[in-house]
Amino acid sequence: MNRRLFGMLGALAALVFTAGACKKDPLSDLDGKPSAIVKQFSQMHVGIGDSAAFVASVVDGRFTPLEETITFSTTGTGFSAVADASYQPQPPTSARAKGYGSAAGTGFVIIQGAGLRDSVAVTVP
């Protein structure tokens, strides 16, 4: 009786593992394709004469960071932002920008990479 039961369980297990191995990963088409820009903040307040930094990455559909070139630019008044050349992550899957407040104003730091675009709102009180 036990021999037949264990034989049947073995055959059933082999059938289940064989059927499960044939399935395709339904998310595999999201791998490696830029999907979004992920940023550390969506809004920053920088005082006059102060600076603040934030990190941004380009990610694929599974939120895996990709090695893409990221650029920063600004719109508005009262501040400026530049890429932080001293930031050297390994692997290079992110970039850091430093924003400097020079006068009262508002605007955005525009983040671009891999054909995608996002922004961080900046206020200098």
Image (spheres, grey):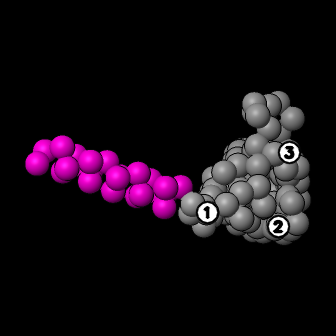
**Disc on the earlier residue, 1 or 3:** 1
Given residues 99 and 114, the one toward you in this image is 114
Q: Quadrant of residue 85?
A: top right
Query: What's the amino acid at mark 1?
Result: Lys
Residue topped by disc 2: 116
Crowding at mark 3 (Cα within 10 Å: few <14, some 14-19, many 20+):
some
- Quadrant position of the C terminus in the picture: bottom right
Q: Is residue 42 visible?
A: no
Mark 1 or 3: in front is 1
Amino acid type, residue under disc 3 in the picture: Ala
Residues 67 and 89: in front is 67
Q: Residue at x 70, y 49 (%)?
A: 65
Residue 88 point in image, percent of width and height = 80, 31
Circles 1 and 3: CB atoms closer than 8 Å? no
Q: Which residue is mark 1?
A: 24
Q: How many marks?
A: 3
CA gap, disc 1 and disc 3: 41 Å
Residue 83: numbered disc: 3
Give SS at disc 1.
loop
Q: Residue at x 22, y 46 (%)?
A: 6
Which quadrant of the view contains residue 44?
A: bottom right
